[in-house]
Image (tube, grey):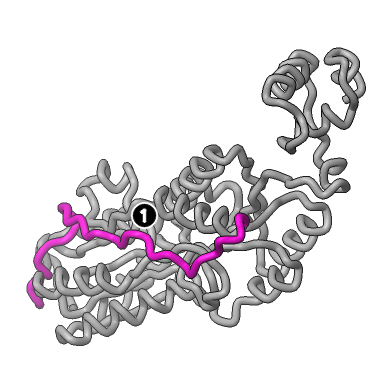
Amino acid sequence: MADIARRAGVSRIAVSYALNGRPGVSADLRERILGIARELGYRANGPALALHGAAARAVGLVLLRSSAALTVEVFRRQLMAGIQAELSGHGFALALQMVTDLEEEIRVYRRWSAERRVDGVLICDPRPDDPRIPAVHELGLPAALIGVSPDDRLPGAWCDDVPWSHRLADHLADLGHRHIARVSGPDGMLHTSVRDEALRSAAGARGVRTTIVRGDYTGESGARLTRELLAGPERPTAIVYDNDVMAIAGLGVAGELGLAVPADLSIVACEDSPLCQVVGPPLTVVRRDIAAYGALATAQLFAALDDHAEPPAQARGGDLAIRRSTGPAPVSGSNGTGRQWRP
């Protein structure tokens, strides 16, 4: 900053005002100082700015996933793309951290808050009695939720999973299915319980039995649970998976067992991706604009940072896209390949 001040023939205070976007210098002088800073390769020192109370111009996102999972899971990638697009429009960066549990996530928030690394955080997958919410309140750390909110004091964005769950249940019931399975994400998340109840209730109203098992969004869990479901004495004629990765793994298992999709087994993915469209057969899916979902939650956080916090906003819900992986339920007694079928 002293070098910039000497080159510009001004005080260091004037340089500080210009670099930090504060009033006190003319527009022409600000532009001249910024030009000299660019020529000299000046970069602000984050910890030093924090000591002076300057904004970090970054938003934090902590994910309970391995970094390897991001390479295959379309939801997180598209969500981050939407978040990043909104951040870029405000000149903010994204601070991303992977953790293994909620306790570690809270420790990350405490460290970020103490070091003033971020101006706010986005909290994914809210839980009932979520310990992260009182933690950010205690820290005074601005936050927005991505998902069904257990606390209307925080802004954020959420999707209504009930309407598409009902449409999906009706679609399978109309095809004659009387036993469907749902391979969900981990237990304990609010959106998981909402989807469980919505599908169970809508299916029950049509006389359809529902079996629910818990996965973890990985292909490994999708494959393992598919094998278990299809090995049972009363195996389902349709399986609904909570994401694209588990559904594609389930499709592979069906092929290994010699089951034709959809003649012997119907498959649905509750997230869409390019892979869902190119596999054989293309998967029936629930489509959502995930990037817009992330952008909306981020916009809500920025409103809170500007002291205009609002209740959580509802994002556009999912649409059922029917492709070739769902079809009429196999007739009791035999399946499309001629083997005995026990529904």
Residue 87, horizontal then vertical, whole percent: 56, 43
Q: Residue at x 50, y 44 (%)?
A: 86
Residue at image location 16% in from the left, 80% down from the top: 178
Q: Which quadrant holds residue 135?
A: bottom right
Name the spot of residue 80 as percent of width and height, x first. Answer: 51, 47
- Magenta stretch bounds: 305-334
| Amino acid type of the residue that numbered disc 1 sits on in the rendered structure | Asp
- Asked whether, in this view, residue 268 is left or right of residue 126, the answer is left
Q: Main secondary structure of the magenta part?
A: loop
With respect to residue 55, does 236 lie above or below? below
Regarding residue 118, the answer to whether it shows in the image is yes
Q: Secondary structure at mark 1?
A: helix
Residue 301 place in picture, x, y as percent: 56, 57
The reply, left or right, for residue 329 in relation to residue 243 is left
Answer few, some or many: residues within 10 Å of disc 1's Cα (few below 14, many 20 plus, some between 14 and 19). many
Residue 261 visible here:
no
